[in-house]
């Protein structure tokens, strides 16, 4: 297997410890402030039930797949008198000498079994954490719990990284050669916080769709909902859910061709502008049941404006054109105003205001600004000063979907520019430790119309035939850290029905930012006979025939400084 060969080549650099018989029992481990809940051996290809998990983390049917002969250790680390972090360790018998730590998205609360399973398969001693609380919805765990918030905000992944090093040393009898991290969304936020606050924890970091500036990200959903008339569902300014489906389809229809290929994908939404006036009733673009009345045209215009704080400074970029608007437009249940993006309500109620009587109905910029002052658990860390991580030779491989509905991809552009300017680096210098890849047509950490599968967390199990560094970001990161070869591009794969490892539908080269990937006119552009976002395709009248994979080239673009 290609990746295994790569590992073998890299493994030559340090001794492997495979083959020993390890003592898989709690007495093997002696860790500070830690209770070893269990340590149990498991055989490859078996499954284990996970009773005790809360419903929002997958109970009652959650089953983890054992992907190597391994020792599973469950630990609880006390992080303060009133907080503890749950850690899960999967220690494969055939160890590559590497560690892989993971975290979760949203306000989770849940162990990322998918990445642990993938990691153990590849010989990593793999770790997960609940980030200090159990569950991905709710507020009880944050209410009046500043130490639990510290775990979620910045401490849990650090504790995980330190625990991982000790656990591996005590189990295998020698220290790990390299320590890696992979996370998406909140896990991507924690990735950058690690690099900034705890630069020694990891040698290599995968930061997917990073939720940096997390409080503004969450607040933006409430502010945009207010801009489109919510919670006054009968007001003339309110834009209904079904109108948004038609609005986004028109935006895609108009803007998609501008990147040179009609495939339902707006390659770079952050460089586009759109005037909703053409969607007004009377223009004939939208029919009478979904067209926009004058006050609604203004609402849509405002929805796509950037967000400023109460002092008038822009703090959050425009909602990206072509992205699904559900995070702010799915805001009623049976005719009653209610935000479907529950993270806002949960976090402001439990963490920002510590007030069970609070509701988001009047949410505005004052609430947003207040959260920045409180900054619960230091959830916003001010991530641009990565100098210590840079100096020690750490590497960051970041990726971000260009059709992200939750975390605007413009934030990754802003962060890249911010790090470059704060460290005063040339492009070559920043590329020596931080590389960013945009994935057109990928949603938030999850599938989309584009060639989204790059060995990211959301593919379990991975496509074992594409584990090489050109197709798999973890593999690319390992090669970069251990043999110095930095990735210039990653080839993403789109599978039929998003069945990872199944029939390939299309592939595309994703270039290191600030290069962009352009179809070079050779071969067909990729197949566009898709799939689930069919509404857009029906709308565009796109063909349903099968096209072959075309070729694309990386082209440098000028950045404005
Ligand atoms: C284990 O594998 C099954 C398919 O065999 C899958 O449905 C399930 O989600 C996997 N469990 C996890 C935690 O990924
Ligand atoms: C685990 O079992 C699967 C399926 O039998 C096999 O493909 C895989 O190579 C095994 N993994 C390891 C690490 O031995
Ligand atoms: C989380 O759940 C585990 C059981 O899966 C339990 O041991 C632990 O105490 C829980 N943590 C919190 C903070 O409730
Ligand atoms: C949260 O609110 C409760 C009830 O009003 C109060 O007792 C507690 O001190 C507050 N905690 C914090 C951290 O503000
Ligand atoms: C909105 O209008 C519907 C009928 O058109 C009515 O039943 C409902 O009470 C109104 N809601 C408000 C909040 O005025
Ligand atoms: C109006 O357009 C919307 C969106 O394209 C469509 O779902 C709906 O069926 C159309 N209604 C009529 C009456 O044609
Ligand atoms: C909404 O209405 C449907 C149909 O009347 C009902 O089944 C459902 O439970 C309601 N949902 C809520 C959240 O009240
Ligand atoms: C936000 O709403 C509160 C009332 O809930 C009001 O006092 C405040 O002035 C508003 N802030 C802005 C920026 O509109």
Image: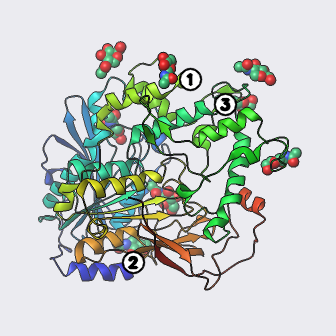
* Residue to which mark 2 is pinned: 468
* Residue to which mark 1 is pinned: 361
Q: Residue at x 42, y 47 (%)?
A: 105
Q: Residue at x 71, y 47 (%)?
A: 247
Figure check: 494 above or below 255: below
Helix, strand or loop at label 2? It is loop
Figure check: 397 above or below 158: below
Figure check: 271 above or below 263: above
389 vs 105, nearest the viewer: 389
- Give percent across and percent down for residue 336: 67, 25
Ligand 5: image quarter: top right
Q: Residue at x 36, y 78 (%)?
A: 3
Asked which quadrant contains residue 241, the reply is top right
Using the image, tell me which numbered label, if any, was put on residue 333.
Answer: 3
Q: CA distance from mark 1 to mark 3?
A: 14 Å
Q: CA distance from mark 3 to mark 2?
A: 46 Å
Determine the residue located farthest toward the bottom in the rendered image. 522
Report the mark closest to the observer, 1 or 2. 1
- Give percent across and percent down for residue 316: 46, 42
Figure check: 106 above or below 39: above
In primary-sequence order, the first of circles 3 and 2 is 3
How many marks can you see?
A: 3
Helix, strand or loop at label 1? It is helix
419 vs 94, nearest the viewer: 419
């Amino acid at each position: 297997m290609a990746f295994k060969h790569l590992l073998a080549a890299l493994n030559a650099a340090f001794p492997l410890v495979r083959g020993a018989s390890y003592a898989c029992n709690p007495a093997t481990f002696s860790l500070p402030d830690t209770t070893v809940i269990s340590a149990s051996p498991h055989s490859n290809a078996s499954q284990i039930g996970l009773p005790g998990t809360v419903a929002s983390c997958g109970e009652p049917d959650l089953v983890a797949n054992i992907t190597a002969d391994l020792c599973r250790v469950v630990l609880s680390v006390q992080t303060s008198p009133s907080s503890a972090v749950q850690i899960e360790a999967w220690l494969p018998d055939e160890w590559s000498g590497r560690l892989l730590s993971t975290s979760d998205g949203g306000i989770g609360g849940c162990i990322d079994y998918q990445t642990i399973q993938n990691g153990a398969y590849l010989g990593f001693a793999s770790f997960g954490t609940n980030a200090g609380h159990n569950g991905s919805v709710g507020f009880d765990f944050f209410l009046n719990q500043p130490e639990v918030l510290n775990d979620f905000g910045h401490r849990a992944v650090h504790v995980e990284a330190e625990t991982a090093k000790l656990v591996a040393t005590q189990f295998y009898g020698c220290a790990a050669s390299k320590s890696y991290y992979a996370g998406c969304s909140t896990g991507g936020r924690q990735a950058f916080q690690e690099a900034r606050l705890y630069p020694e924890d990891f040698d290599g970091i995968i930061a997917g769709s990073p939720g940096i500036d997390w409080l503004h990200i969450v607040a933006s959903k409430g502010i945009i909902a207010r801009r489109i008339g919510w919670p006054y569902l009968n007001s003339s300014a309110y834009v209904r859910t079904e109108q948004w489906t038609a609005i986004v389809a028109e935006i895609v229809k108009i803007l998609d061709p501008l990147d040179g290929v009609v495939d339902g994908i707006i390659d770079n939404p952050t460089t586009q502008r759109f005037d909703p006036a053409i969607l007004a009733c009377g223009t004939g673009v939208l029919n009478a049941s979904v067209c926009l009345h004058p006050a609604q045209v203004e609402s849509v215009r405002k929805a796509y404006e950037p967000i400023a704080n109460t002092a008038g400074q822009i703090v959050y970029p425009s909602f990206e054109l072509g992205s699904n608007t559900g995070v702010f437009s799915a805001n009623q249940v049976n005719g009653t105003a209610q935000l479907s993006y529950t993270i806002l309500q949960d976090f402001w109620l439990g963490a920002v205001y510590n007030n069970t009587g609070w509701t988001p109905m009047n949410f505005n910029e004052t609430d947003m600004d207040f959260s920045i002052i409180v900054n619960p658990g230091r959830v916003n860390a001010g991530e641009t000063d990565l100098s210590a991580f840079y100096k020690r030779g750490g590497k960051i491989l970041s990726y971000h979907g260009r059709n992200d509905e939750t975390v605007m991809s413009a934030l990754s552009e802003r962060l890249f520019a911010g790090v470059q300017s704060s460290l005063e680096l040339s492009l070559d210098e920043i590329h020596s430790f931080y590389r960013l890849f945009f994935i057109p047509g990928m949603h938030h950490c999850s599938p989309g119309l584009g060639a989204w599968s790059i060995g990211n967390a959301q593919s379990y199990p991975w496509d074992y035939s594409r584990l090489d560094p050109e197709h798999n970001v973890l593999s690319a990161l390992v090669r970069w850290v251990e043999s110095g070869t930095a990735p210039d591009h990653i080839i993403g794969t789109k599978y039929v029905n998003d069945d990872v490892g199944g029939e390939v539908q299309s592939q595309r080269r994703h270039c290191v930012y600030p290069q962009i990937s352009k179809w070079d006119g050779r071969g067909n552009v990729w197949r566009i006979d898709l799939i689930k976002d069919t509404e857009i395709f029906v709308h565009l009248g796109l063909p349903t025939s099968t096209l072959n994979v075309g070729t694309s080239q990386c082209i440098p673009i000028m950045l404005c400084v």
